[in-house]
Amino acid sequence: MKKKINFSKVVMLFSIPLLAFILWYIFLPAINLHSFGFWIYIIITLVYALFLLSIFNKKYYQFFILPATLFLLLLLLRMFSATMFHSTKYANLIIKENGSFEEDIKEVSFEQVPTVDRDTAQRLGSRKMGEMLDLVSQYNVSDSYTQINYEDKPVRVTPLEYNGFLKWIGNKNEGIPNYIIVNMIDGKVELKKLDNNIKYSKSDKFSRDIYRHLRQKYPKDMFFEVNFEIDEEGTPYWIAPVYQNTIGFFGGLDVKEVILTNATNGETTKYKIQDVPKWVDRIYDADEIIQQLNWNGKFQLGFLNSLFAQKGVLQTTEGYNYLAIDDDVYLYTGMTSIGTDESNVGFVLVNLRTKETTFYKMSSAEEFSAMESAEGAVQEKGYKSTFPILLNIDSKPTYFMSLKDEAGLVKMYALVDAQNYQQVSVATTVNNVVSAHMGKDITNDSFEKNIEPTEFFNTKGKITSIQSVVINGNTHYYFIVDTHNDIFIANIGISAQLPFLKVNDEISIEYYKKDHLNQVTNIKLK
């Protein structure tokens, strides 16, 4: 009987380190006293150990005070790291510099306007995957779709992932052979075939799971979400920001270093933020940046002011989007007062690689008001707007958004003046909507290249013939008037009256000569 009890003791005591290992292997807490998860891991392990020991000897019950004390200390350390005790430090986690919209934000090249949002990119990626019959039974498309700049274009990239544990067993030696690139400008989808397949990913198991692989190499570092990116040669990498608590014991979480992992061979390199290769676009997490912006807007004048007087208290709007500027990815979001008004006092751009933050003070419509205004322009169609991106169009801040039908397909595009959201333009192509918004034909070479015509002419006459044609998605009107033998051509963006012109209408025209045609710049119906 005695030997049996001793054997039971051995089994139970052995289960303590076994449980500790299993918990660590599953949850992968950083072995770091500043990690909240590590404290929870220690407390759970202690409770389990004391529970087993108390089965054999009740004197161990008194030691339950140890995990209880640790839990109380954890709560106290968490509480004294809160914003109410360090409001100024939280406000200064992100530093905003004032900027000039006209000087800092270049006028957009309309061939580079991103028209594909995350939801559309996912639909396009899934459709592309469905065409690959040899892959679709073995792999799924990951839903990560990280937005980066690649070959000077905004794209979203995402890897394939194993379609379950059994498919991992059957394909783990080969690895993941592809990732998907979605061009955010024209929606082109490329299923990139790798020379060296991905062997470390979120869908891999055991030591090839990317989180477990990183934890085994860096047991003390705190990292959470990892992003999928590709370098300029198309090699896939996992980007893992390493965090530290900068305020109190558990507060002010911020990035201090970055770990890059080659997804094909598992090689890792840790960099200081200033030394990270420039092709890396996403070091800072968007949600963390939004939190820091809200702290900055809330606590500039202290914690009590944020509760009572609320003088100068700002907050971000509910959504955000990304802009590609000078080969970097910027987070864009509006800043509004703490009240319930539907306007912004300005907006911020945050470089997601460096965290450089610029605030543009500018009264403008709140993004969701602009979205409603765009939807209202086509209310009979029932289209829904994407969250807007902010563009510089004709030196004015302008919201650009896509309008989708119930199936999630982009049907039209909209531009809304950010400072006067009742000024809305909609069209079926980007060029058309910009032409309508600016009141001039941007598809014409002279405007695209900013080469102004040297001589303009004016004439009047009665229309004797008129026809409309669509060229590269843009509607053009060709007509002849009784006072001239030459043909006149006008883009739909020149005037909203064009679709209603008919034979015998009298018109006045401003035009210039180009390529044996009279290019109309202004037209009025008499």
Image (cartoon, rainbow, N blue to C red):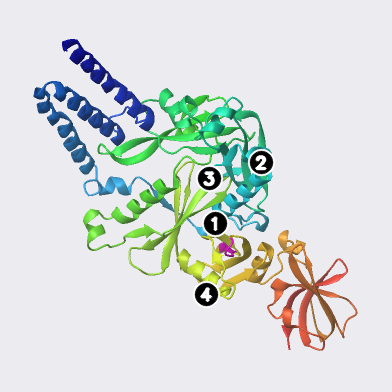
Pointer 4: what residue? 422
Residue in view at x 47 percent, y 39 percent = 283
- The image quarter in which residue 407 lies: bottom right
The 10 Å Cα crowd at callout 3, few under 14, some 14 to 19, many 20 or more, is some
Whether 504 is drawn above or below 73: the answer is below
Q: Residue at x 60, y 36 (%)?
A: 138
Looking at the rendered structure, the secondary structure element under dot 1 is helix
Three-letter residue code for mark 1: Glu
Which residue appears at 66% of the width and 71% of the height? Answer: 436
- Nearer the N terminus, badge 4 or badge 2? 2
* Classed neighbour count for the residue bearing mark 4: other residues with Cα under 10 Å, few (<14), some (14–19), many (≥20): some
Magenta range is 400-407
Residue at the farthest top position: 3
Q: Are marks 4 and 2 in contact (CB under 8 Å)?
A: no
Question: Is residue 272 or residue 40 the one in the foreground?
Answer: 40
Q: Magenta part mainly helix, strand or loop? A: strand
Residue 103 badge: 1
Q: Residues within 10 Å of mark 1 (few under 14, many from 20)?
A: few
Task: Report, in whole angstroms, how far the alpha carbon at label 4 lies from the one at label 2.
Answer: 41 Å
**Rounded to the nearest whole Å, what is the CA distance between mark 3 and mark 2?**
15 Å
How crowded is the residue under tag 2: few (<14 C-alpha within 10 Å), some, or many (20+)?
some
**Nearer the observer, disc 1 or disc 2?**
2
Sequence order check, earlier mark of 3 and 4: 3
Name the side, left or right, on which 403 lies relative to 469: left
Q: Is residue 403 magenta?
A: yes
- Which percent across, then down, holds residue 308? 22, 62
| SS category of the residue bearing label 3 | loop
Cα–Cα span, label 1 and label 2: 39 Å
Q: Which residue is mark 2?
A: 191
CA gap between label 1 and label 4 equals 25 Å
